[in-house]
Amino acid sequence: MTRPLGFANNYALGIRRARAAELGIKTISDLKRHPNLRLGFSNEFLKRADGWPGLRARYGLPQADVRGLDHRLAYEGLRDEWESWSPLVAPGGVMAIHDSRASGKNTADSGSVRYTNDVVVGDPRFEVIDTMDSLTVLRRRT
């Protein structure tokens, strides 16, 4: 175990600003007034007790059209982020990737875990210096 790295395994809900204004949504509780709103989350979030089931129970959310998002999108999303950001890390610089490891919170088949295993850990520019729960910490080789 290492010292805390200052990262948390948190989730966020997002809605386009214009749509939120149109519907009068400013807080999670405001979602109760929109039972027909379609929601999409990662499959992990849908299954986790502290994910959608917990959120729904805590706020009494009535939405029935709740969908899991395709893990391939997570794979492609991490690929795009990795290809954009990894070249910008200076030698000796550190990069942390969230949801990159299978743990109680993430499954081995999730896109971000698969991309990390398929590509990131084998990238010769980086070395894995630490892992914690679902987090992988890498250092750019000099």
Image (cartoon, rainbow, N blue to C red):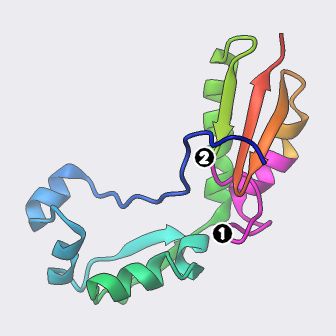
Residue at position x 36%, y 61% in the image: 13
Would you identify the image quadrant in which residue 9 lies? bottom right
Crowding around mark 1 (Cα neighbors within 10 Å: few <14, some 14 to 19, many 20+) is some
Q: Is residue 30 above or below residue 86?
A: below
| Magenta-colored span | 98-117
Amino acid under disc 2: Gly
Mark 1 lies on residue: 105
Crowding around mark 2 (Cα neighbors within 10 Å: few <14, some 14 to 19, many 20+) is some
Residue at position x 75%, y 11% in the image: 91
Residue 98 at x, y percent in the picture: 63, 48
Q: Which dot, 1 or 2, sits closer to the camera? A: 1
Would you identify the image quadrant in which residue 102 lies? bottom right
Residue 134 at x, y percent in the picture: 70, 56
Residue at position x 63%, y 55% in the image: 74
* Secondary structure character of the magenta stretch overall: loop
Amino acid under disc 1: Lys
Quadrant including the C terminus = top right
Q: In what element is the residue under mark 1?
A: loop
Residue 51 at x, y percent in the picture: 49, 75
Mark 2 lies on residue: 77
Q: Is residue 6 above or below residue 22?
A: above
Is residue 17 one of those drawn in magenta?
A: no
